Image (spheres, rainbow, N blue to C red):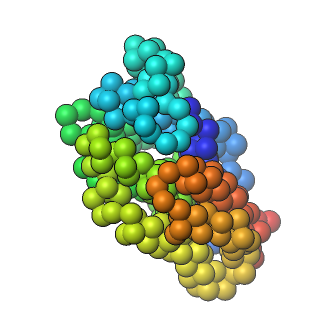
């Protein structure tokens, strides 16, 4: 299930829900409290899709021979032989089915147009590592992660609350999606040697180690810059709360800048995931506590 990656699913739901409540408040001077039922359903869909992506990646990379015994990092079920391909495929399809069921319930509450978004998410889940031309092997993994675990998940979580589009969820989706991409960048930086050897042409393989390191730093810096801009535009210091996570992310930045692809980057992956979750929680709290976001 790759538990370290699950914050990438929870973070956009937290921020999107908070942005929805804040956007309602900014537009009308006050606003209704978020629906916890809809929020939990959205979080369940996001978590199930994240787990399904992890199962799919394990399955497809395992049967394709990409996950070999030379790979650095946590064991992969199929690649290590601990889980049969058939069992992993069943787990993948069952998780996708569960996500679809919960998604239908959410669509019944918030709008059937969500079914189209869900269908696209299912296609992306299977196409990320599967098929004749997997998305991850074309250097497009980072784009797909940003779109679905940033924009779609954050804006979608706001949409299920108020069934309306506003600019705020789009803006806050940028740092949320950025940290999700940062997780993938660290993962792919760690795996450059084995991915290159097995023909998995990730973005990290294409641009090389040094540029991948620079990409990680650029993503992290951009996340905090977006917070600065938003806090300045709204004249709201509460929105700057995510800066409390800077000491948490600095060790990961140092490791990514100095460590060779290999075991040291496993720790950077965990630190990045913890930072993402803390960043999202603090951003959501800042949105709700600020004078523009407080409800009566």
Q: State the image coordinates of residue 39 (x, y, percent, origin top left).
A: 63, 43
Residue sitting at x 68%, y 51%: 34
Q: State the image coordinates of residue 226 (x, y, percent, origin top left).
A: 54, 76
Residue sitting at x 25%, y 43%: 199
Residue sitting at x 47%, y 35%: 54
Q: State the image coordinates of residue 167 (x, y, percent, origin top left).
A: 48, 69
Residue furthest left in the image: 132
Residue furthest right in the image: 296
Residue sitting at x 58%, y 64%: 255
Can see residue 204?
yes
Q: State the image coordinates of residue 173 (x, y, percent, origin top left).
A: 51, 62
Specify whether 235 is left or right of 61. right
**Circle count:** 0
Depth order, front residue of 22/94: 94
Quadrant that contains the N terminus: top right
28 relative to 86, above or below = below
- Residue 214: which quarter of the image? bottom left
71 relative to 190, above or below = above
Quadrant that contains the C terminus: bottom right
Can see residue 168?
no
Depth order, front residue of 103/257: 257
Specify whether 18 is left or right of 144. right
């Amino acid at each position: 299930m790759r538990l370290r990656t699950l914050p990438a699913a929870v973070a956009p739901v937290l921020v999107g829900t908070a942005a929805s409540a804040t956007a309602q408040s900014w537009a009308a001077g006050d606003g209704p409290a978020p629906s916890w039922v809809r929020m939990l359903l959205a979080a369940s869909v996001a978590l199930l899709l994240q787990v399904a992506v992890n199962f799919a990646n394990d399955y497809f990379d395992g049967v394709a021979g990409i996950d070999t015994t030379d790979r650095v990092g946590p064991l992969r079920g199929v690649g290590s032989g601990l889980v049969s391909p058939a069992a992993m495929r069943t787990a993948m399809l069952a998780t996708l089915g569960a996500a679809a069921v919960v998604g239908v319930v959410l669509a019944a509450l918030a709008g059937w147009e969500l079914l189209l978004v869900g269908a696209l998410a299912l296609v992306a889940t299977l196409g990320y590592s599967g098929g004749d031309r997997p998305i991850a092997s074309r250097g497009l993994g980072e784009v797909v992660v940003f779109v679905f675990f940033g924009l779609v998940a954050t804006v979608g979580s706001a949409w299920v609350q108020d069934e309306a589009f506003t600019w705020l969820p789009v803006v806050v989706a940028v740092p949320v999606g950025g940290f999700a991409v940062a997780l993938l960048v660290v993962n792919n930086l760690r795996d450059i040697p084995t991915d290159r050897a097995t023909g998995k042409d990730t973005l990290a393989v294409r641009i090389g180690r040094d540029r991948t390191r620079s990409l990680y730093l650029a993503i992290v810096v951009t996340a905090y810059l977006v917070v600065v801009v938003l806090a300045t535009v709204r004249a709201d210091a509460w929105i700057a709360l995510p800066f409390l996570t800077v000491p948490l992310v600095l060790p990961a930045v140092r490791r990514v800048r100095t460590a060779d692809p290999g075991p040291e980057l496993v720790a950077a992956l965990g630190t990045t995931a913890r930072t993402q979750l803390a960043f999202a929680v603090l951003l959501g709290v800042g949105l709700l506590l600020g004078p523009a976001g407080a409800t009566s």
